[in-house]
Image (spheres, helix red, strand yellow):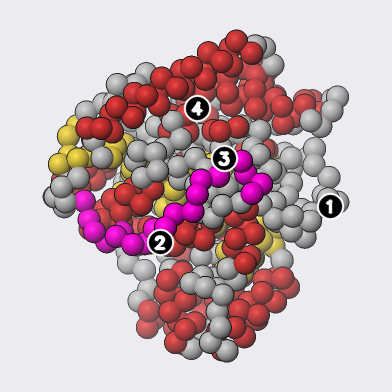
Amino acid sequence: MTPKTELSRDEAVTAPTSLALWSAEDLVAGFAAGDFTPEDATRAALAQIEAHDGAVNAIVLRDDDTALAMAAQSTARWRAGEPLGPVDGVPMTIKDILLTRDWPTLRGSNLIDEAGPWDADAPAVARLRAAGTVFLGKNTTPEFAWKGVTDSLRHGATGNPWGVGLTGGGSSGGAATAVGLGMGTWSVGTDGGGSVRIPASFTGTVALKPTFGRVPLFPPSPYGTLAHAGPMARTVRDTALLLDVIAQPDSRDWAALDVVSGSHLEGIEDGVAGLRIAFSPTLGYGNNDPEVDAAVREAAQVLARLGADVEEIDPDIPDCVDAFHTLWFTGAAKVVEAFGEGALERIDPRLRQAIEDFGLGASASDYLDATGVRMDLGVRMGAFHEDYDLLVTPTMPVAAFPVGQDAPDGWPSTLWTSWTPYTYPFNMTQQPALSVPCGLTADRRPIGLQIVGPRHADALTLRAARAYERATEWHRAVPTLLS
């Protein structure tokens, strides 16, 4: 199926709301040329929220006054020829897991008091504020970002740009849906087991889980070193540009990596010719919907036609789901424990069940055993990448399923890890992993291709994704709600 193309630049100038669908790079070029202002772009994004959020529930906090004030300040800087940097004035949203000064961070939970105080920014938010981006509001998340779809007792369920009856995925589902509908040019999400990549796959957007520590986090995640923060956008180049901004050291994160020299956009157009790419359709243990399988196989062939040496081979790794459960749900148990007696009875019943099944009974020995599995997995993937520069897989074995469900129809388990077999392993190994659109099902639901690099190879991962994006049109497909 051939996707529709997005509006041309000339068409977009005549339709104010279409500015909401422009890339950050094009917006900034327009600001610099004086074609339009950050205030114009912000009003366009706010108009998209007004038009669509009632149907999809992607925004839990909207602050027009703050957004327009930030946009006015940015407009003044551009008119004076003194922008703060290459993203000044770009409108955006923030996942409601990341602290944002003067706004409550409720994490989808009734356990959190809205009163605050809210006097600090998370590292990524602080970098974006300093860079002059315009904050529109905060995105929905499941309670404490615990699962692969976005619904909570506090805020309800989040839909999908490709159909309000479809889930946007999770846990960064509100961010992905907002980005897909132009309710902000990009967003920052978190990913402890697939939480930026799952919704990117379901919504036809792009998201990168960078190498662990590349984007600092504060406060420390209760999910420990599984948790990453990452950029979410509509194009690979915007994803790289956003990573440049947020991948800056912060003294509050003891595990933060040193700053990268240069930009992640440097070399991003260099292509994949000569790269050794392993294509694993199932990692040796998954099972894909036939349309997903066909789409990712064709994507692998695209990379081969671009000059990569593509070999179909599975890495020598077992399914690490049991170890992941121990690490993930002991973390979830500690989150809830901090709210005192009776908190377990007030949370999402499915989260409570998972904590009781996998978290509360785990011993220190169990935790160390799970860590041992993780270390072995990292060793195996390190050896694998001595022979292969990159690994490509489906992001998800299925396309988006009905909103309000925890799993696809007829799935043998409702636990989110049962239908996300290709995402959580790379949180265990801390490798960069990116989802880029690679097709649509017959009924127009997006399919994602996952590109995985060795640790610290974020730029190479982005480069391969950009080569694929440049050779295809899937990133230009227009979501149903915008058709």
Q: Nearer the viewer, residue 30 or 416?
A: 30
Earlier sequence position, callout 1 versus callout 2: 1
The residue carrying mark 2 is 263
Crowd around label 2: few <14 · some 14–19 · many ≥20 (10 Å): some
Mark 4 vs mark 3, CA separation in Å: 26 Å
Q: Which mark is residue 417?
A: 4
Q: Is 259 contained in the magenta span?
A: yes
Q: Nearer the viewer, mark 2 or mark 4?
A: 2
Mark 2 vs mark 4, CA separation in Å: 34 Å
Residue 310 screen position, x and y as percent:
17, 39
Mark 1 vs mark 3, CA separation in Å: 26 Å
Q: Is residue 398 above or below residue 274?
A: above
The residue that appears at 62% across and 24% down in the rendered structure is 329
Q: Is residue 27 above or below residue 161?
A: below
The residue carrying mark 1 is 117
Q: Amino acid at mark 2?
A: Ser
The secondary structure that most of the magenta stretch takes on is: loop
Q: Amino acid at mark 3?
A: Ala
Q: Which mark is residue 255?
A: 3
Mark 1 vs mark 2, CA separation in Å: 36 Å
Crowd around label 3: few <14 · some 14–19 · many ≥20 (10 Å): some
Crowd around label 1: few <14 · some 14–19 · many ≥20 (10 Å): few
| Disc 3 element | loop
| Disc 2 element | loop
Q: Taking the image as drawn, is residue 20 in sight?
A: no
Q: Nearer the viewer, residue 401 or 240?
A: 240
Earlier sequence position, callout 4 versus callout 1: 1
Q: Look at the image and give the residue range highlighted in magenta.
A: 251-272
Q: Quadrant of residue 381?
A: top left
Q: Is 448 contained in the magenta span?
A: no
Q: Quadrant of residue 46?
A: bottom right
Do the CB atoms of the residues marked 1 and 3 lie less than 8 Å apart?
A: no
